[in-house]
Amino acid sequence: MTERHLRVNPITCRAHGICAELLPEMINLDEWGYPILVDGAVPGSVLSDARQAVAACPTLALSLVARRR
């Protein structure tokens, strides 16, 4: 079985915070505005929102990766 997980590239992230606005269930922001991802698989109930957050990232720092369980 395959699970989807969020990943952020800290080098390309510029702390716009759009991801946390679109997916507050899985992404929090630190005091500088950089994302802190909730550990674990993205639940099916928010998978569509996760895809939107990935697509909305202006620096393409957020990605959704498949992992085998």
Image: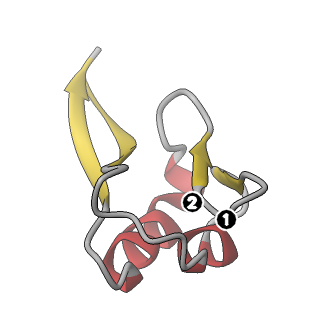
Q: Is residue 38 left or right of residue 13?
A: right
Q: Number of callouts in the render?
A: 2
Quadrant containing the C terminus is top left
Q: Is residue 10 left or right of residue 30?
A: left
- In the image, 51 versus 10, the foreground residue is 10
Which one is in front, 60 or 26?
A: 60
16 to 28, vertically: above or below? below
**10 Å neighbourhood of mark 1: few (<14), some, or many (≥20)?**
some
> In the orientation shown, which residue stands out farthest toward the right?
31
**Which residue is painted at 23% across and 43% down in the image?**
65
Horizontal side of 50 relative to 7 (left or right) equals right
Name the image quarter holding residue 35.
bottom right
Q: Residues within 10 Å of mark 2 (few under 14, many from 20)?
A: few
The amino acid on which the numbered mark 1 sits, given as a three-letter code, is: Gly
Q: Write the residue at 71% across / 57% down.
A: 29
Q: Which residue does the image show at 45% across and 70% down from the upper left?
A: 48
Label disc, if present, on residue 46 of the rendered structure: 2
**Would you name the residue on which mark 1 appears?**
33
Q: CA distance from mark 1 to mark 2?
A: 22 Å
Residue 58: x and y, percent?
A: 34, 85
Residue 60 shown left or right of residue 34 in the figure: left
Q: Secondary structure at mark 1?
A: loop
Q: x%, y% of residue 19?
A: 54, 71
- To which quarter of the image does residue 18 belong? bottom right
Q: Give the vertical position of 43 relative to 17 (above or below).
A: above
Q: Earlier in the sequence, mark 1 or mark 2?
A: 1
- The N terminus, quarter of image: top left
> Which coloring applies here?
secondary structure
Task: Identify the residue at horizontal 49%, vertical 43% (top origin).
Answer: 42
* Amino acid under disc 2: Val
Rendered location of residue 37, percent (x, y): 57, 43
